[in-house]
Image (cartoon, helix red, strand yellow):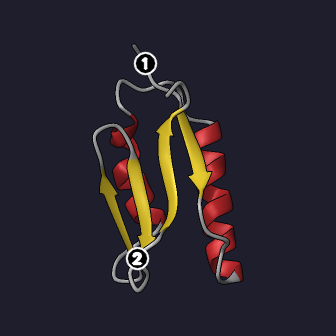
Amino acid sequence: MLQLPELRQELPASTPEEAARLTELAQLLATTAPLPDVRDLAPAVRQLFPEPAYEVGCGGSHIWLHRADEAGRLACIIDRHQ
């Protein structure tokens, strides 16, 4: 079954630049065709939110995004049907 990526922002943007990156990420997800696995988007997320300022990783069926200096997730990308 193909997965439709959905962005779940968990913290507000801390800067205008970060807000712009989150908007760009939302637009990317809105225009992405269904995927075999949402984790396939991790490289694109890492390009938008590069180290060392951000950490991007994958869980069982999702992508998580943290600011490097904070413990809480900034956002998570999941399959819309979860």
| Mark pair 1, 2: CA separation | 31 Å
- Left/right placement of residue 21 relative to residue 43 reads right
10 Å crowding of disc 2: few (<14), some (14-19), many (20+):
few
**Callout 2: helix, strand or loop?**
loop
At 34% from the left and 83% from the top, the residue drawn is 52
At 31% from the left and 58% from the top, the residue drawn is 57
- Left/right placement of residue 74 relative to residue 43 reads right
Q: Which residue is outermost to the top? A: 1
Residue 10 appears at what percent x and percent y?
59, 61
- The image quadrant that residue 9 belongs to is bottom right
At 47% from the left and 40% from the top, the residue drawn is 78
Looking at the rendered structure, which numbered label has been put on residue 31? none
Q: Is residue 4 above or below residue 45?
A: above
Look at mark 2 in the image and give the residue it sits on: 71
Q: Which residue is outermost to the front? A: 72
Q: Is residue 58 above or below residue 20?
A: above
At 48% from the left and 65% from the top, the residue drawn is 48
Q: Is residue 72 above or below residue 79?
A: below
Q: Earlier in the sequence, mark 1 or mark 2?
A: 1
Look at mark 1 in the image and give the residue it sits on: 2
Q: Amino acid at mark 2?
A: Ala
**Callout 1: helix, strand or loop?**
loop
Out of 49 and 6, give the one closest to the viewer.
6
Q: Amino acid at mark 1?
A: Leu
Residue 26 appears at what percent x and percent y?
64, 50
| Foreground label between 1 and 2 | 2
Quadrant holding the N terminus:
top left
